[in-house]
Image (cartoon, grey):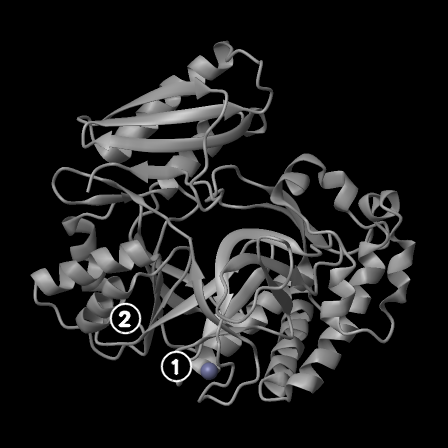
Amino acid sequence: MTKVLRRNIVRFRRYRLLKRLEYSSSEGLSIYQGQRLRKLLEYGLATPRAEKEGGAHLFRAEGLLPAQILKTLPILQKEVVQKKLASLVSAKGRTRRSIEDRTSGSTGAPTIFIRDLACLDAERAAAELFYRDWLGRERREPVARIWATEADQAPTGEKVGGFFRKRISEIWLSAFNLNDADMADFFKLWQSHEPSILIGYPEAVFECAKYLRRNRIRIPHLKGIVTAGAKLFPEMRSEVERSFMAPVLERYGSRETGLVAMECLEGRRLHVVAPNVYVEILNESGAPALPGEEGSVVVTPFYSYKMPFLRYVMGDRAKWALDQACVCGRSWPVIEEIVGRAQDCFRLRDGGTVSGMLGYYIMRDCFDFSKISQFQFIQESYERVTAQIQLSMPHDEPDREFFDAIVKARDRFSQSMGPNCSIHFKFVDHIPRLSSGKHRYLMSLVD
Ligand SMILES: [Zn+2]
């Protein structure tokens, strides 16, 4: 059996399991989550970090509910993953198949971590459920994406992808530099492919919605628009729904945890993918937040065996819905709102925008990332951006290598922003956080 076939079989099993648990009772779900969590704990206890903290007492997990088990565990901050990666790798999971992965660094500093392939399978299965069953996308229907891709200046065009690696066509628009010419090309492609689903960053999808309205372009046959990676403001949502004539649904997750929550079409409410992840929302004192109370999102993905993410702090704030019942009838917990997630974009004088992801790619590709602790781009005007860099070793002086990197970064920056906008690099000891406690990697002072 080929590796691809084997993975597809696993993914299909996960998908069927999700379907089976979609409408199960809360009690049944909780029992299932307890089983998953105990299995994950077997791996979690075999890490140097757990052993150092005397993890043996955790064996009392038998018979307890997930919330009771998790209460006994410390939370896992992103900084621990960044600085003590080896202490989180499970000896029990040594032979498990995995990949080294890294986050997009949307909170300023990227995180390198080890992703168990089982976690990836669970995520793909959830995505399949979401697009196929919740949104009604038929298997071979094309998808449109407005995304900031790995390759800096990814061209607008067609791609091949999909759950079973069949030839499903996708059309792409790079969110890096949204301009009228690229959007015109993209919507021309759109007419010939007629995608049924659009996936994109809220701010980029919003820019396209405005373009459609300006040019009086009508979009037929779209079943839904899925936004992820940033906060979707209500005014953006209604503009997008009007222009594309389709509902907008939010998806929430991260690279480390996979898909955490997704919005149902019937109730338009954000459901936690309960068979794959356990979500806690903790208030300032670390206790579970009450329904309606804002708190910090902490996620435990059940399939992260090789490097168990037990109580991982996402860096986002959210609140549970007061009323957990949803008209769709699913029992998966409902998050009222993800608050405090912001992903700005750079602004151009001609009204165009460039995705804030550009900042991350510049830092990742031009500098030695391991020497950078945090960064922040501040757009002071259309003509001027300042990049603040906080080094990992605070007393390190930026060396020759950094100055070479700056030359490269300036080049890269003007490729996207044009020759009239200059960028200045500043090494600082500390980058202050927002009052919410969150770091923003891009602050735009241009409205
Ligand atoms: Zn629902």
The disc placed on residue 265 is: 1
Query: Residue sitting at 63 percent across and 39 percent down?
Result: 79
Q: Quadrant of residue 3?
A: bottom right
On the question of residue 166 being in view, the answer is no
Left or right: 198 with respect to 336?
A: left
Find disc 2 in the rendering and name its residue.
193
Where does the C terminus fall, quadrant-wise? top left
Separation (CA) of disc 2 from disc 1: 24 Å
What amino acid is found at the position of numbered circle 1 in the picture?
A: Leu
Residue shown at the point (85%, 67%) measured from the top left: 61
Residue 81 image offset from top left, x and y in percent: 66, 42
Please give left or right for residue 153 compared with residue 46 in the image. Answer: left
**Dot 1, how many residues are within 10 Å of its Cα: few (below 14), some (14-19), or many (20+)?**
some
Residue flagged by tag 2: what amino acid is it?
His
Q: Position of residue 309 (x, y in %)?
A: 69, 54
The picture quadrant where one finds residue 394 is top right
Image location of residue 241, percent across then percent down: 24, 72
